[in-house]
Image: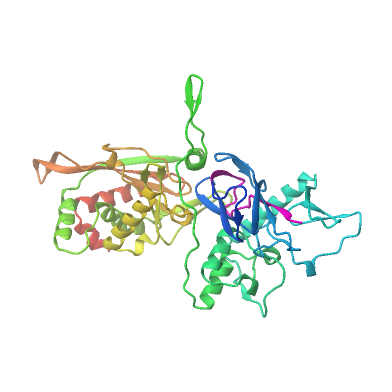
Amino acid sequence: MAQVLEFKLPDLGEGLTEAEIVRWLVQVGDVVAVDQPVVEVETAKAMVEVPCPYGGVVTARFGEEGTELPVGAPLLTVAVGERAPEPEGSGNVLVGYGTQAPAARRRRVRAGTAAVDGQGFRRAADGTGQAAPTGAPGNGRAARRGTARADAHASTPTTAPARPAAAPTEGPVPVISPLVRKLARDNGVDLRRLAGSGPDGLILRADVENALRAGAAPLRTAEEPVVRTPAAPVAQGGGTRIPLKGVRGAVADKLSRSRREIPDATCWVDADATELMRARAAMNAAGGPKISLLALLARICTAGLARFPELNSFVDTEAREVVRLDQVHLGFAAQTERGLVVPVVRDAHARDAESLTAEFARLTEAARTGTLTPGELTGGTFTLNNYGVFGVDGSTPIINHPEAAMLGVGRIVPKPWVHEGELAVRQVVQLSLTFDHRVCDGGTAGGFLRYVADCVEQPAVLLRTL
């Protein structure tokens, strides 16, 4: 007799509590293999393909496309082959979900009793293997709380490296998320040979990466979620209501938090960008890869942050400390059809103009096509906002929480300007700096902005200070 197993929406390792069904990848009646992606779901900031840990025939799906489900809710049921006494499975268990242990390791159950499996369902002792709800909702909540705690451990930078086991372990292998399982599979890592550093031996992403480094194997990043279009508007009587969820909801939450927590202030200055534009034209005329204006402005920013490190920081509110950062991970605002996103250029302070140009181009294209990963959208320490592309001169932008500052750049346009004592038409730009007043006072903010303006007006200033 076929055994029907229920696969629930797992915790995807982002500390989130729900996800929206974007697209079903299988139909009822389809045969699925172990670890085959069965559904695409959208979290607060990204889209994930969720693989099923069972192999068999899909007998039911739960939720239409566009439905929002909480973590732990049923996704689908799979009927395992009639002749198989045990469910076929990957053995790589998600936190609180996944395949069962082999029969040899399963505890015998007396007649008239039932055993509770790892999914919170009772299995009848008559051997039918039919699943029935336990009726104890507290079990699901406890499992999710345990998952959240495991995710917290996973993000701790002092996680101990995984230790290769002497021999493969028996039974299911606890793995924190589908992305970690895919990372291991793509790189040929046998999860059964790893001793996880998480709670109760839970295998974390850092464990797989450490195993790859120890074996000198090439690290290929597991497929990451991608940003997708927010939900469509819903008409409501005399107006249109647009749900604040998905990407739009994540942006709204972050901006609202910034306004609530950060006492920001803005200062601005007009600058003559004529010489900067000439310098860029000369660089591009010399041959080689073209240098973008954004890359030159980023180079100026990183030099300015080296002189005014107070602005490359964040406030630890619990410890009541300002944390100054050694590295500059430069975010830049990019408007796309999917909404405003802020990709991050890692280690911008260590890149030259050519490298910055290439990275800006790569991330901008990924933003346009919706293929940015969560790692490319988080971890920024300072943001460069070129709102001049919208044809405006100035702005008072909201700081990208938890950063401490953002430099805004308006359009560069010909304007009357007094140059060397004479009225002339010059290329003028307005620069603005919005900063967290907790990390510094106006003198520091003004000093940084004046340095940036001096470099824009006289690029040689940048060369002298490098």
In the rendered image, residue 47, in percent from the top left (x then y), is placed at 50, 49
The residue at the far top in this view is: 238
Q: Is residue 55 left or right of residue 274?
A: right
The residue at the far right in this view is: 111
Residue at the spot 27% in from the left edge and 36% down from the top edge: 392
Q: Is residue 321 left or right of residue 171?
A: left
Residue at the spot 33% in from the left edge and 37% down from the top edge: 395
Q: Is residue 143 left or right of residue 444?
A: right
Residue 13 painted magenta = yes
Which quadrant would residue 336 be assigned to in this image? top left
Q: Which image quadrant: the C terminus? A: bottom left
Residue at the spot 80% in from the left edge and 47% down from the top edge: 134
In the rendered image, residue 367, in percent from the top left (x then y), is placed at 38, 50
Asked whether the viewer can see residue 349, the reply is yes
In the rendered image, residue 298, in percent from the top left (x then y), is placed at 31, 55
350 and 452: which one is in front? 350
Q: Is residue 136 above or below residue 302?
A: above
Q: Is residue 142 left or right of residue 382?
A: right
In the rendered image, residue 438, in percent from the top left (x then y), is placed at 47, 46
Asked whether the viewer can see residue 261, the reply is no
Residue 161 painted magenta = no
Residue at the spot 67% in from the left edge and 65% down from the top edge: 91
- Give the extent of the magenta segment: 1-23
Q: Is residue 270 above or below residue 377?
A: above
* Number of numbered discs: 0
The residue at the far bottom in this view is: 166
